Image: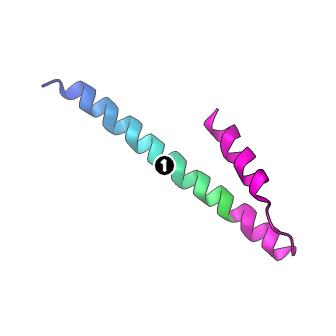
Amino acid sequence: MNYGNHDLLARRTLGAVENFQSTKRVLSDLMMTSAKSGETLPHQAIKSFLTALIR
């Protein structure tokens, strides 16, 4: 069994999880900020933000 490939996969998976956690924090902050200002974050804005992150 090639453990080098498992190590690479583990590092990439961890990186993806860390990126996801970071994205969740950014979205949460955006929604908190908009809620405090009395605005709601439209669904399209969230979709556009996530689409930009994926690219």
Q: Is residue 7 left or right of residue 30?
A: left
The vertical placement of 3 against 21, above or below, is above
Q: Position of residue 39 (x, y in %)?
A: 86, 70
Question: Which residue is rendered at x = 74% and y = 45% of the image?
Answer: 48
Q: How is the image coloured?
A: rainbow
Q: Quadrant of residue 35?
A: bottom right
For the magenta stretch, what is the residue range? 29-55
Q: Residues within 10 Å of mark 1 (few under 14, many from 20)?
A: few
Q: Quadrant of the C terminus?
A: top right
Question: Which residue is rendered at x = 71% and y = 49% of the image?
Answer: 47
The vertical placement of 30 against 47, above or below, is below
Q: Main secondary structure of the magenta part?
A: helix
The vertical placement of 13 against 33, above or below, is above
Q: Secondary structure at mark 1?
A: helix
Q: Quadrant of residue 5?
A: top left
Q: Position of residue 36 (x, y in %)?
A: 82, 75
Q: Quadrant of residue 34?
A: bottom right
Question: Which residue is rendered at x = 32% and y = 38% of the image?
Answer: 10
* Residue 37 belongs to the span the image colors magenta: yes
Q: Quadrant of the N terminus?
A: top left
Q: Is residue 1 left or right of residue 6?
A: left
Q: Position of residue 30 (x, y in %)?
A: 74, 61
- What kind of residue is marked 1? Glu
Q: Is residue 29 left or right of residue 45?
A: left
* Residue 46 belongs to the span the image colors magenta: yes
Q: Which residue is mark 1?
A: 18
Number of callouts in the render?
1
Q: Residue furthest left?
A: 1
